[in-house]
């Protein structure tokens, strides 16, 4: 820390009965009152250097012994006034970064200029400030911090702006060597006297201290300093991001996973009310959002989500939340499930987590400049228009392979796993509407989910947490699942899951039969009730199924598969139970097309002749196979 000593006389100020005086053979003739304190001094040494005191003395009436001067708005208080008074008496004073701002403001107030006397205090302070303070890193930081006590004076005297420029210039001087070391500011000190004396050998300067050191500044000064650093465009954006992270850990409250705010013990005075603390933290957060570098990846997705979680708790502005959501969406593949569990503090919903903001994040992620793959141009020839389903599958798989080679494909695969894990967490919330659950699940494109096991777990958790769902809602929920992408374990669980709709179980069993037929080379017979239900859905149970492709698009209601159900008895008993449940439904339950449940069952019994011929063909195949055995 650099310092400067002025004057040569020993300190002769003393206090008697709450009055500060100076030891002198000459009787005092001036009383100066500064913020409740009285100084018994002499006119000659003070008025010879202070133009303001000259004017005040000439304007005030002179008493018989002492002339009284009132200075109620003196900047810096009694400490700053005493520095100026001692300078006038020639008493030794020590100036440093800790008191130079107060002394400079006090000297300006007293008008201790060169017009009054050459080599006056303002001139000496300016020389020390320009040649020593602004050349030292720590001195500039400390001086800038001390301007908070005199904001208007510091702005008028350009102390604040000059300190910020000095700090920014040091950070920008060698940006290639700038790295983040969190301990330098606690180690090195450059204690060099501006009078020529050196109290400590100046150690070689080590870069890497700036982020932690400027984190000691208040948010207003920090914001201005970071703007000056960013304007230089020489500091890498990732270092700007790391600096913001250091500042956030220093000033913002710690937020736990469940949204509880843990206040920092040393950051706020005990006298601050809760509202004042919240407002202060809100200002810090919104200012930090405005300082985020524009480059993607300059800050981690985890840090952005922590800021977003804090923004929700602190009720930050909607613009700050929107900007954070946009930034998170640009690099969502880096996030974890716990990061997305943002507590909801809205009075309009009772959900535990803020699902709306996550939906916004997903929309932003999916809107990144990747256009969907286009289908290959089709020939105008008729046979091209009538080509087989397998050819369509090959084209679709070709497009999927093209998409997988794009830069965003891998990130979408990661986000799909992330979203399915997130759905499992929010599915436990009994107040979560079905529409919001489905909206998040459907925000992920079909190709991004290589398997649907995690999505099935989320659906199962939601069904257990919401036992009062209507059958139509359960069907609507299950339509988001593609059973062709379920593993054997998931299929076994789904086939025996009593919470799933009847149609789901039928489809699970059908796909299990189809896969078994593909594996064994023959089609086994199906129970008549399953045949009827499958025929009603337009599925021909007598035809061997086409090869299953993970990219084949079939109706959403039929997207189920199962394999590995080891017990036919258990399988059939589960189906009978489901059929019994279906028979017990209210006959007055209406279908969206206006046909009642009872009418649909009658129509099911009156199947057209074509399915009957298929069943006969299936029966003859199985009969001939049994005769051979």
Image: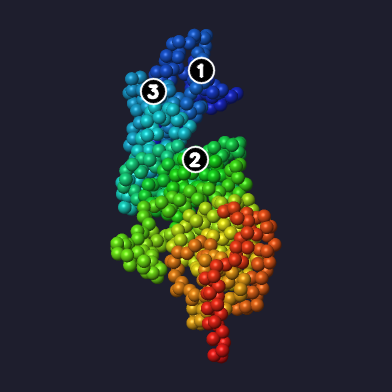
Does residue 55 lie above or below 419 as drawn?
Answer: above
Query: Whole-Å distance between the Cαs marked 1 and 3?
Result: 18 Å
Q: Quadrant of the C terminus?
A: bottom right
417 or 500, nearer to the observer = 500
x, y percent for residue 109: 43, 23
Front position among marks 1 and 2: 2
| Label 3 residue SS | loop
Q: Residue at x 36, y 43 (%)?
A: 229
Marked residue nearer the N-terminal end (3 or 2): 3
- Most extreme residue toward the front is 609
Does residue 182 lie above or below 624 as drawn?
Answer: above
x, y percent for residue 136: 37, 42
| Label 2 residue SS | helix
- What mark, if any, has residue 70 been given in the picture? 1
- What mark, if any, has residue 112 been given in the picture? 3
What is the tally of numbered marks visible in this picture?
3
Q: Quadrant of the N terminus?
A: top left
x, y percent for residue 32: 51, 19
Does residue 119 lie above or below 516 as drawn?
Answer: above
Q: Residue at x 60, y 42 (%)?
A: 348
Front position among marks 3 and 2: 2
Query: Whole-Å distance between the Cαs marked 1 and 2?
Result: 50 Å
| Label 1 residue SS | strand
- What mark, if any, has residue 318 been given in the picture? 2
- Are there few (<14), some (14-19), or many (20+) residues within 10 Å of tag 3? many
Q: Are marks 1 and 3 in contact (CB under 8 Å)?
A: no
């Amino acid at each position: 820390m650099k310092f400067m000593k002025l004057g040569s006389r020993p300190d002769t100020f003393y206090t008697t009965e709450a009055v500060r005086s100076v030891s002198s053979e000459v009787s005092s003739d001036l009383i100066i009152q500064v913020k409740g304190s009285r100084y018994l001094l002499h006119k000659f040494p003070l008025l010879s250097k202070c133009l303001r005191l000259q004017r005040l003395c000439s304007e005030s009436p002179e008493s018989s012994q002492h002339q009284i001067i009132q200075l109620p708005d003196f900047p810096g208080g009694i400490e700053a006034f005493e520095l100026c008074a001692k300078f006038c008496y020639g008493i030794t004073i020590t100036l440093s970064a800790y008191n130079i701002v107060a002394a400079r403001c006090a000297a300006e107030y007293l008008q201790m200029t060169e017009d009054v006397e050459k080599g006056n205090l303002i001139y000496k302070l300016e020389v020390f400030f320009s040649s020593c303070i602004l050349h030292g890193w720590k001195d500039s930081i400390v001086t800038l911090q001390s301007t908070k006590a005199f904001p208007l004076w510091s702005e008028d005297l350009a102390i604040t702006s000059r300190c910020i420029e000095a700090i920014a210039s040091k950070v920008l001087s060698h940006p290639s060597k700038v790295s983040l070391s969190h301990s330098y500011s606690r180690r090195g000190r450059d204690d060099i006297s501006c009078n020529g004396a050196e109290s400590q050998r100046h150690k070689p300067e080590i870069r890497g201290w700036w982020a932690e050191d400027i984190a000691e500044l208040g948010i207003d000064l920090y914001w201005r300093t970071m703007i000056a650093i960013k304007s230089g465009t020489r500091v890498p954006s990732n270092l700007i991001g790391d600096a913001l992270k250091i500042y956030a850990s220093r000033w913002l409250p710690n937020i736990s996973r469940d949204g509880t705010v843990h206040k920092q013990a040393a950051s706020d005075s005990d006298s601050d009310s809760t509202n004042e603390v919240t407002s202060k933290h809100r200002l810090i957060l919104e200012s930090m959002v405005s300082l985020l570098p524009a480059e993607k990846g300059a800050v981690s997705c985890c840090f952005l989500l922590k800021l977003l979680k804090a923004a929700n708790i602190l009720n930050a502005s909607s613009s700050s939340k929107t900007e954070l959501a946009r930034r998170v969406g640009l690099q969502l593949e880096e996030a974890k499930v716990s990061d997305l569990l943002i507590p909801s503090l809205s009075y309009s919903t009772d959900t535990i987590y803020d699902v709306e903001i996550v939906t916004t994040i997903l929309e932003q992620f999916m809107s990144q400049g990747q256009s969907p793959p286009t289908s290959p141009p089709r020939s105008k020839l008729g046979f091209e228009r009538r080509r087989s389903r397998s050819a369509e599958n090959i084209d679709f798989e070709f497009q999927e392979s093209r998409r997988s080679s794009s830069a965003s494909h891998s990130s979408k695969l990661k986000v799909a796993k992330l979203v399915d894990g997130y759905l499992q967490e929010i599915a436990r919330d009994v107040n979560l509407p079905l529409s919001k659950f489905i909206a998040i699940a459907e925000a992920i494109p079909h190709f991004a989910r290589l398997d649907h096991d995690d999505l099935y777990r989320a659906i199962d958790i939601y069904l257990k947490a919401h036992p009062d769902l209507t059958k139509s809602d359960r069907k609507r929920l299950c339509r988001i699942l593609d059973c062709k992408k379920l593993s054997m374990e998931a299929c076994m669980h789904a086939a025996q899951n009593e919470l799933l709709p009847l149609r789901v179980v039928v489809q699970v069993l059908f796909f299990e039969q189809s896969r078994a037929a593909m594996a064994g080379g023959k089609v086994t017979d199906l129970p008549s009730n399953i045949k009827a239900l499958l025929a009603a859905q337009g599925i021909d149970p007598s035809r061997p199924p086409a090869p299953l492709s993970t990219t084949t698009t079939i109706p959403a209601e039929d997207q189920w598969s199962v394999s590995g159900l080891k017990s036919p008895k258990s399988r059939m008993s589960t189906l009978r139970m489901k059929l019994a449940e279906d028979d017990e439904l209210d006959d007055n339950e209406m279908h969206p097309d206006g046909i009642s449940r009872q009418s649909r069952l009658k129509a099911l019994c009156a199947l057209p002749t074509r399915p009957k011929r298929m069943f006969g063909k299936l029966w003859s195949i199985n009969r001939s196979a049994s005769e051979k055995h």
